[in-house]
Amino acid sequence: MADCAQCGVALQGSPLICGGCGAVQPVAATDYFAVLGLERRLGLDGAAVEREFHRLSRRLHPDRFARASEAEKQNSLAATALLNDAWRTLRDPVERVEYLLKLEGYAVGEEHAGKGKSAERQPPPDLLEEVFELNMQLEELRMSQRMGETADAEVVADLAAAEKRFAAMLNDVDAALVAEGARWDGGQGRAEAAARMIELLDRRRYVRNLVRDVRQSLTVTA
Ligand SMILES: [Zn+2]
């Protein structure tokens, strides 16, 4: 850990502020976990992290530096922006996984699917058949919408059922992400846990878009 730029005391917890003299530190290259004084872990005590976020927010608030030097004002603005980014990213369990994996050097999402081959557009192999069917029904629904005709009740019912099914699938993916996250935190089989989480993130993106498409189409009909 670095020392305070003002009083020289070793910084504890978040590197944004000195626990000794209270000086805001110049923002250095650091990661979001460190910003909040956290270890790089996927399992977080959300309430504790939120309290720490609010505590740091108050201490870094630019209003407190209204009469400080220009450098301190700039530090407080930069530190506040970094703190907000860190909190926004880490509070969301899915973004937290993506962020940590990237931090650890893994290619995630589009990076891993390759340029122009968006993972969002490639159905997971086990869903191919169901997605094919779903797209046919979506096409049928959109066609009747374009023609200004009443949508086929059976198609609408099938799509509504599919939406429910895929939404449930999203919940399963999230539960699996939590389980793999715990495996990662445990330190055993990290590479496998990472590979599995990258897969789950792809699946999540794909299914989420599917649910969104179906919802949109059904909303137009309703
Ligand atoms: Zn200090």
Image: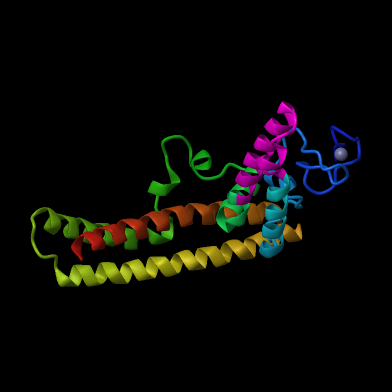
Residue extending furthest top? 70
State whether residue 207 is above or below residue 33.
below
State whether residue 202 is above or below residue 126.
above
Residue 110 part of the magenta segment: no
Residue 193 left/right relative to 164: right
**Where in the figure is residue 133, as x and y percent of width and height?**
27, 62
Q: Quadrant of residue 105?
A: top right
- Is any atom of residue 85 visible in this view? yes
Choose between 164 and 51: the one closer to the eye: 51
Residue at image point 58% right, 61% down: 177
The N terminus lies in quadrant: top right
Residue at image point 70% right, 37% down: 76
**Where in the figure is residue 183, as x and y percent of width and height?**
69, 62
**Where in the figure is residue 197, as x and y percent of width and height?**
58, 55
Choose between 19 and 200: the one closer to the eye: 19
Residue 1 left/right relative to 95: right
Q: Quadrant of residue 78?
A: top right
Residue 71 part of the magenta segment: yes
**Where in the figure is residue 140, as x and y percent of width and height?**
17, 59
Choose between 95 and 74: the one closer to the eye: 74
The C terminus lies in quadrant: bottom left
Total numbered labels: 0
Residue at image point 47% right, 57% down: 204
- The residues colored magenta run 60-87
Residue 55 left/right relative to 137: right
